[in-house]
């Protein structure tokens, strides 16, 4: 988000936004329609089905608008600056704190306290905490996600390389990627694609697998410049040497390279499954659990060596929505246990509640996506790194002077090690100024 956002949000505090009293169980809502904004078209059909059931009970129409990621935040910022925000919308870890601190989101505390369907103890703690500021809850967890390894069996078959398994380490990925890139040189086929601008489904996981943290658990520091962090980024560097060049990915993206049959492996998040499930060559695609780092060299996956980043969106409402009772009622509907399960069954996303996403693994007939659910038992989940102003350091460490130089030219280990040191300083300085 631009610096102007912070100024705009602060200005909105002067507007004296008020919060209505919580809805009763049999409230008559004052609105006939709620506007809901999301950014993922893959989730539209399932969420609309769930919302329509709420509409049947309440008589209030729900219109879900899909806005692409960049325009989503532009429009929300415009609404926060004096325009009209949607009634209900998704919140994300990158910007949640700014919206919460400036009283632009509806305070949900009284609503939750009077709602038998919602108990915040039933949701993933990291997501609950993310959308809580100074003890006030501003969003209810919508979902959570995990990361897995996607591979193209046809490419592996063509070049005589064995398929990935759940037992693969990052060293195994490197060996297979090297073999395929060498064998596929004349065909323009690479063994691996890693878009370094995608951190949650990409290089963040290496850092944690090797025992470092992009942001420490207390959100006050980082260990990315440690020996463990450097070992992780050295593995990233080795993979980048045999992977699709970053200059190519900047134009095409990992998903396009994979779906075009020009990349044999990528890591991807559970929120993107439908993109590959509906692809022309989906019968060739398969998922394995995210590989692990055998950091201690004992040949086994020990606790903490297979880590998957997880994040979670929150359903929030505008503080100045015309009908806060209706807005919260819809949020409660989306987030109650029955519809959290329904969301998983429909293949929308995995639930924001632990233990109710089993149906998600079977939501894509003909494609086994259980790697996303099994990692929760056979690996370690860590919450997507964030601080008060995540985008400040997150953007900076991807620029020249930090990781960009090493990513564009991954031939020099010293360049990558220096980038880790620089990233350490960038993150520490950014946090100190928050």
Image (cartoon, helix red, strand yellow):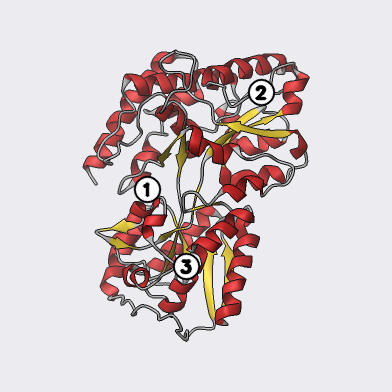
Tag 2 near tag 1, CB within 8 Å: no
- What is the CA distance from the residue labelled 2 to the residue labelled 1? 36 Å
| Nearest to the observer: residue 348 or residue 14 | 348
> Label 1: few (<14), some or many (≥20) within 10 Å?
some
Q: Position of residue 169 (x, y in %)?
A: 53, 21
User: Dot 1 corresponds to which residue?
Assistant: 126
> Label 3: few (<14), some or many (≥20) within 10 Å?
many
User: Dot 3 corresponds to which residue?
Assistant: 331
Query: Residue at position x 60%, y 66% from top?
Result: 50
Q: Nearer the viewer, mark 2 or mark 3?
A: 3
Q: Earlier in the sequence, mark 2 or mark 3?
A: 2
Residue 385 in which image quadrant: top left
Q: Position of residue 127 (x, y in %)?
A: 39, 51
Tell me if residue 246 comes above or below residue 271 in the rendering: above
Query: Residue at position x 36%, y 66% from top?
Result: 105
Label 2: state its secondary structure.
Answer: loop
- What is the CA distance from the residue labelled 1 to the residue labelled 3? 19 Å
Q: Would residue 21 appear left or right of 62 to someone viewing this image?
A: left
Residue 98 in which image quadrant: bottom left
| Nearest to the observer: residue 39 or residue 125 | 125
User: Dot 2 corresponds to which residue?
Assistant: 190
Label 3: state its secondary structure.
Answer: helix
Q: Would residue 295 appear left or right of 284 to someone viewing this image?
A: left
> Label 2: few (<14), some or many (≥20) within 10 Å?
many
Q: Earlier in the sequence, mark 1 or mark 3?
A: 1
Label 1: state its secondary structure.
Answer: helix
Query: Residue at position x 24%, y 59% from top?
Result: 134
């Amino acid at each position: 988000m631009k610096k102007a956002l912070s100024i705009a949000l602060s200005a909105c505090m002067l507007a004296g936004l008020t919060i209505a009293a919580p809805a009763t169980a049999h409230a008559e809502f004052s609105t006939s329609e709620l506007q809901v904004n999301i950014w993922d078209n893959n989730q539209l059909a399932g969420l609309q089905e769930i919302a329509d059931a709420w509409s049947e009970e309440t008589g209030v129409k729900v219109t879900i608008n899909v806005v692409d990621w960049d325009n989503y935040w532009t429009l929300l910022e415009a609404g926060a600056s004096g325009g009209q925000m949607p009634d209900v919308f998704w919140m994300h870890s990158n910007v949640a704190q700014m919206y919460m601190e400036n009283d632009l989101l509806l305070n949900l505390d009284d609503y939750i306290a009077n709602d038998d369907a919602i108990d915040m103890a039933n949701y993933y703690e990291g997501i609950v905490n993310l959308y809580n500021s100074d003890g006030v809850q501003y969003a209810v967890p919508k979902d959570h996600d995990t990361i897995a390894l996607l591979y193209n069996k046809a490419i592996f078959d063509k070049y005589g390389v064995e398929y990935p398994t759940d037992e693969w380490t990052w060293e195994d990925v490197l060996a297979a990627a090297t073999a395929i890139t060498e064998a596929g040189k004349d065909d323009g086929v690479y063994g691996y694609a890693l878009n370094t601008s995608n951190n949650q489904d990409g290089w963040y996981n290496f850092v944690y697998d090797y025992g470092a943290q992009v942001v420490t658990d207390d959100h006050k520091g980082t260990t990315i410049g440690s020996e463990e962090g450097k070992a992780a980024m050295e593995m990233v560097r080795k993979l980048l040497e045999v992977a699709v060049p970053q200059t190519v990915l900047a134009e095409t993206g990992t998903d396009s390279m994979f779906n075009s049959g020009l990349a044999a492996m990528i890591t991807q998040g559970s929120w993107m499954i439908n993109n590959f499930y509906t692809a022309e060559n989906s019968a060739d695609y398969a998922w394995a659990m995210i590989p692990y780092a055998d950091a201690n060299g004992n040949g086994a996956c020990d606790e903490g060596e297979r880590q998957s980043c997880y994040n979670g969106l929150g359903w929030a409402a505008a503080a100045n929505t015309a009908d806060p009772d209706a807005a919260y009622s819809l949020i409660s509907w989306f987030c109650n246990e029955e519809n959290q399960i329904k969301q998983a069954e429909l293949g929308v996303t995995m639930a924001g509640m632990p233990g109710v996403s089993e149906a998600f693994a079977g939501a894509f007939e003909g494609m086994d996506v259980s790697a996303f659910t099994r990692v929760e038992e056979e690996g370690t989940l860590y919450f997507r790194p964030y601080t008060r102003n995540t985008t400040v350091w997150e953007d900076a460490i991807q620029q020249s002077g930090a990781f960009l130089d090493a990513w564009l030219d991954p031939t020099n280990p010293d360049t990558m090690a220096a980038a880790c040191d620089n990233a350490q300083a960038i993150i520490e300085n950014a946090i100190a100024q928050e």
